[in-house]
Amino acid sequence: MLSKKKKIFILAGMLVLLVVTGVLNVILNQTAKGDDNTPVVAGSFFENYRSDRIETRNQTIMYLDAIINSEASSEADISAAQAEKLKISTAMNQELTIEGLIKAQGFEDCVVTTGANVNVIVKSDPLTEDELIQILYIVTEETGRDPATEIQIIPIS
């Protein structure tokens, strides 16, 4: 059992740590604000999107691997997990290829998602008709999708 003095010292130490944490929180929040008192956004939309996409896919692949390696999984479950893993891998390669080809056309940045539709988010002021045609051509050639119904291009600045 702790003596009364030890309990007081432990309580006082915890109180000091709490105060230091609060002060550091206030200081860090103030330094993370811009000159006009708006928070500074860490990274760009494109960096954050890619990071989130990678994290989500890595978790999904980890779950699929757990199914594939589990002794409790049936052959049908293992086969479905392997097919889904292949589908994710194909989508990753396709998106990376399309993003690279679009950047090679002179666009600063872009992200591509594939699924039921292909979504292309391009860092650009409003797109010209020629730029839109370039992007549609790349996506159509790489995916074989119908540009009228299955491809959406979203410019952001």
Image (spheres, rainbow, N blue to C red):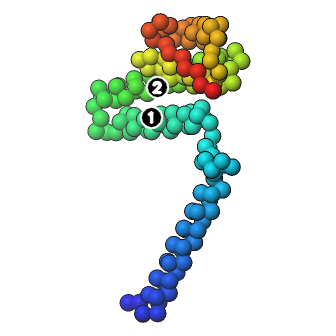
Provide residue 74's location: percent of width, then percent of height: 28, 31
* Residue 9 located left or right of residue 29: left
Q: Residue drawn at (54%, 8%), measured in percent from left and top? A: 140
- Please identify the quadrant where the N terminus is shown: bottom left
Whether residue 89 is visible to the viewer of this picture, yes or no, is yes
Front residue of 100/61: it is 100
Q: Residue drawn at (62%, 7%), measured in percent from left and top? A: 129
Residue at disc 1, secondary structure: helix
Q: Which residue is mark 1?
A: 61
* Residue 108 located left or right of residue 22: right
Question: CB under 8 Å between callouts 1 and 2?
Answer: yes
Residue at disc 2, secondary structure: helix
* Residue 87 located left or right of residue 30: left
In the displayed structure, 123 sits above or below 31; it is: above
Whether residue 138 is visible to the viewer of this picture, yes or no, is no
Q: Amino acid at mark 2?
A: Ile
Q: CA distance from mark 1 to mark 2?
A: 8 Å
Provide residue 99's location: percent of width, then percent of height: 61, 21
Neighbour class for label 2 at 10 Å: few (<14), some, many (≥20)?
Answer: some
Q: Which residue is mark 2?
A: 88
Front residue of 70/22: it is 22
Q: Residue drawn at (65%, 21%), measured in percent from left and top? A: 125
Q: Residue 153 lies in what quarter of the image? A: top right
Q: Choose the circle earlier in sequence order: 1 or 2.
A: 1
Neighbour class for label 1 at 10 Å: few (<14), some, many (≥20)?
Answer: some
Q: Residue drawn at (44%, 9%), measured in percent from left and top? A: 149
- Please identify the quadrant where the C terminus is shown: top right
